[in-house]
Image (cartoon, helix red, strand yellow):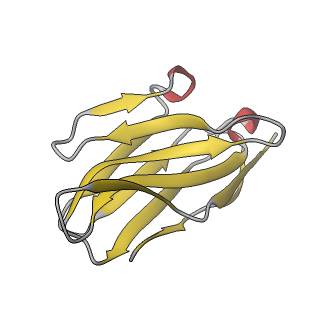
Amino acid sequence: QVQLVESGGGLVQAGGSLRLSCAASGSIFGVRYMGWYRQAPGKQRELVAVIAKGGSTNYADSVKGRFTISRDNAKNTVYLQMNSLKPEDTAVYFCNAEVASYSSTYYDYWGQGTQVTVSS
C-alpha cells in the first residue's frame, strides 16, 4: 500500500509565497514521475508542474517563472515552491506520483489534496 501525504497549504495574500510538500510512504520499490495538479471550484483538474526522477521538469504556462518543483529521491518527497501568488492560483492542490510497490509495474497514486487560498 502506498500513501501520498501533502502539507503546506493555507491562506496567503496576493504576492505571497507558500511551499507544498508531498511524501510518498509505504511499500515502495521505485518512484518515477512526481507532480502537482490543482482544481479550482467549477473547473477541471489541471497540471501545475511535474518532475522526473532525473530532475527534468515541466510547468503549466500560468505558473512558469513563479513556481518551482523539486524532489528529494532519498525521501520520496516532492516540493512545490509557489512565489508571487495570485488569486487565480486559489485551488485544491493534489500530489501525484507514479510508484512501483513490489515489482517494476508503476501505478498512479494521488494525495488527498491541500487547499491553497490567495486573497486579493
Left or right, 34 with respect to 54, comes to right
**In this image, 65 relative to 15: left or right?**
left
Q: At 36% from the left edge and 69% from the top edge, which residue is drawn? A: 24
Please name the residue shown 44% across and 37% down the image: 49
Q: Nearer the viewer, residue 31 or 116?
A: 31
Residue furthest top as drawn: 61
Identify the image quadrant of residue 89.
top right
Position of residue 65 relative to residue 111, above or below, is above
Which one is nearer the viewer's eye here, 90 or 31?
Answer: 31
Place of residue 96 in the rendered image (x, y in percent of width and height, measured from the top left): 45, 52
Q: Position of residue 78 (x, y in %)?
A: 36, 56
> Residue 35 at x, y = what percent?
42, 46
**Quarter of the image where the C terminus is located:** top right
Q: Is residue 81 above or below residue 99?
A: above
Q: Residue at point 69% right, 43% down? A: 39
Q: Choose top left, top right, bottom left or bottom right for residue 114.
A: bottom right
Position above or below: 91 against 72: above
Q: Is residue 62 left or right of residue 32?
A: right
Residue 112 left/right relative to 81? right
The foreground one among 29 and 15 is 29
**Figure quadrant of the N terminus:** bottom left
Number of callouts in the render? 0
| Residue at image location 82% in from the left, 43% down from the top | 41
Front-most of 102 and 25? Answer: 102
